[in-house]
Amino acid sequence: MTNQIANLAARLAAVERRLASTARTAQLAYSSIEDGAINVFDQDGSLRAVIGQQPDGTTGINIVNGPPPPTPAPPTVNSVLGGVAAAWDGNFVDSVAAPLDFARIEVHAAGLDSFTPSAATLCGTLDSPRGGTLTIPADQPLYVRLLVRNTSGAASAPSAQAGPVGPAPVIAQEVLDGIISETKLARDAVTSAALALGAVNTSAIADDAITTPKLLAGAVTTDKLFASSVTAEKIAALAVTTDKLSALAVTADKVATNAITAAKIAAGAIDATHIKAGAITADKLDAGAINGKVVTGATIRTADSGRRIVLNPSSDSEPALEIYSGSSSETAPGRVRASVLDMGNWLQPEVVLESPAVASSRADVTLRSPELNGMGLVRLEPSDQLDGYAHITVKNGGPNGDSELTLYGSRGGNVGGGSHSMVLKGTGITWNSGTRQMTFSGGVLRAPNIVSGAVSITPTANTPTSVTVSGLSVAGTVFRAFVTANASVPGSVAECTATNVTANGLTVWINRSTTATTSVWYLIIGS
C-alpha cells in the first residue's frame, strides 16, 4: 500500500510539471503550414482572411468580405482648360477615419443631375487615403461623385454630388465684354448695311447734325418727302438737271409744244428703251452702221430654226449661249452659262455646260473655281433631277486642305429612297449609307457593323458575375459577340462569355476565383 501511494504521488507531480510547461510555451512554436492556409473567421463565422497559399496558387494574406467603407466627403470641382478638376481632401462623412483596408477612391462624372455611379461614369481613381486631384476632360458642365473601394472590392455609398461645373473658356467673358470700344472702330467701319432697321431715329441724331455734305447723292427720294414739301422757292436755279430726273418722269403732256428741238437732245440720249418696237427698219440703217458697235439686250442667232447657236440675254431667266441640235426630240437647247454663287463667306464663280434636253433629261458639267480659299471644284451629273440621281464631284483642297473626290448615287423615291456616297480625301476614304458611315483612315477601318469596347467587372469569387453594356448602335440584323478577360493572373479566370447580344448592347459575364476587378474586352459584329 505504501508503494502504491508513493507511485501515485510521483505521477501527480509529473502531471503538474507538464501542465506548467504547457502553459508557458507558444501553441505554434516550431510549427509550419504545409501546402495549405489558415482561414480567419469573425465571431459570426464569416471568412475574413486567408493566410498562406491562395486559391490561385499565390502565397500571402488575402483579405475578403471586408465591411463596406465609410462614405467619402464630397469633392471640390473647379473649371480648367479643356475640362474640370475634381479634388478630394481625404476626409469622410461624420469625420470617420480612413479604413485600414482602403484600396482607392473612384471618381465618377456625368452631365445628368443626381446620376448613379456606374462603370460608364468612372473617370479615374485616387490611390491615396490622404486625397488628391483628378482632371476630367469635358466639353460640357459635369456633376462629380466619389465612392471608396476597400481591398475586398466592397464599395461605399456614393458621396454627395458636386457641380455642375464646366470647362474654363479660353477667353473669359469679362474680357470679351467691352473688347470693342468706340475708339477701336475705324472710320467708315459702321455702314448702313450694318445698322438694324430703325436703329438710328430722330432721338439719336443731334440737331443740325445732318447737313447737305452729309447726304449721299439720291439719298432723299420722293417717298422720304412730305406731300408738297418741295415748292418752287425751295429749288435753286439749275438745281434740277437731267440726272436728277427719274426715267420717264417727263412725259409728253409735261412738255410744251416745240420745247424739245434737235439742239436740246444730247448725244446718246436716245437709246433702245426710247425707241418704239419696229420703228427702226433695215431701210433706215446705213450700210455698216452696226460694224464695230456694241449691241446690248439683243438676241443674236445664226438661224431662226434648226441647228443653230443663239446668244439669248434671258435663257431660263439668265443670259446664256444656247446650242440647238435641230433634233425633233429636243425639248430644250444645250446651254453655256455663267453665274456667281453667294456662299455666305465668299463669292464663288461658276460656268455650267449643259447638253440639250431630251424628255426632260440632260447632262451637265459644272466648273467652280476658285473659291475664297483657292480651291477649285468640278461637278459632273447626268441631269438636274433631285429624286434618284448621281454625280461625281472633284475638289482641289489647295495647300491648306485635302483634295476630295465624291461619288454619289441615290435611289428614287418610288423604290424606297436613300443614298450612298464614297468620298476619297487626302486623309482617307469614307463610305456613307443613309445615317451610317464607314471610314478608312491611317490604315484603320471603322465600320458601323463592328463595335468594340471594354467593361470593368468586380466579380464575386467563384460565382458568375455580369455587367450589361447598352447604348450601342450596331448595324445589321444578326449579331455575334466575342469577349475576353484582361487578367494579369493566368488561370484565375474560369470563364468569360456574353449573352443578350443585340444592336443596342450585350451582357458580359465572368467567373473568376478572386474578387479582383477585371477589365473584359468585347467585340460585336453585325451582319
Image (spheres, grey):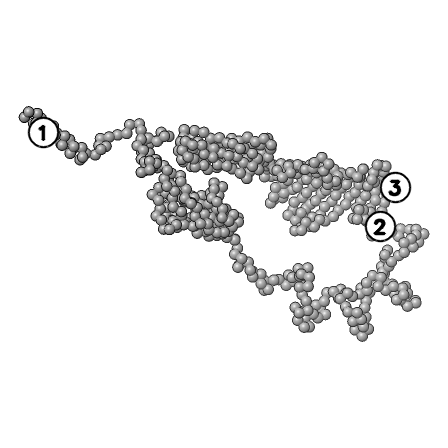
Q: Which residue is mark 1?
A: 9
At 72% from the left and 42% from the top, the residue drawn is: 366
Q: Nearer the viewer, residue 245 or 284?
A: 245
- Marks 3,1: beta carbons within 8 A: no
Category of crowding for the residue at label 2, using alpha-carbon neighbours closer than 10 angstroms: few (below 14), some (14–19), many (at least 20):
few
How many angstroms separate mark 2 from mark 3 (CA)? Answer: 17 Å
Question: Does 236 sit above or below residue 30?
Answer: below
Q: Secondary structure at mark 3?
A: loop
Sequence-wise, which precedes: disc 3 or disc 1?
1
Q: Quadrant of residue 227?
A: bottom right
In the picture, the quarter occupied by the C terminus is top right
How many angstroms separate mark 1 from mark 2 (CA)? Answer: 150 Å
Q: Which residue is mark 2?
A: 298
- Marks 1,2: beta carbons within 8 A: no
Q: Position of residue 167 (x, y in %)?
A: 50, 51
Q: Quadrant of residue 8?
A: top left
Sequence-wise, which precedes: disc 1 or disc 2?
1
How many angstroms separate mark 3 from mark 1 (CA)? Answer: 151 Å
In the picture, the quarter occupied by the N terminus is top left
Q: Nearer the viewer, residue 489 or 94?
A: 94
Q: Secondary structure at mark 1?
A: helix
Tell me if I can see residue 49 in this picture: no
Q: Which residue is mark 3?
A: 305
In this rendering, position of residue 23 left or right of residue 92: left
At 40% from the left and 47% from the top, the residue drawn is: 71
Tell me if I can see residue 211 in this picture: yes
Q: Position of residue 332 (x, y in %)?
A: 82, 41
At 85% from the left and 45% from the top, the residue drawn is: 301
Q: Amino acid at mark 3?
A: Ser
Sequence-wise, which precedes: disc 2 or disc 3?
2
In this rendering, position of residue 513 left or right of residue 394: left
Q: Nearer the viewer, mark 1 or mark 2?
A: 1
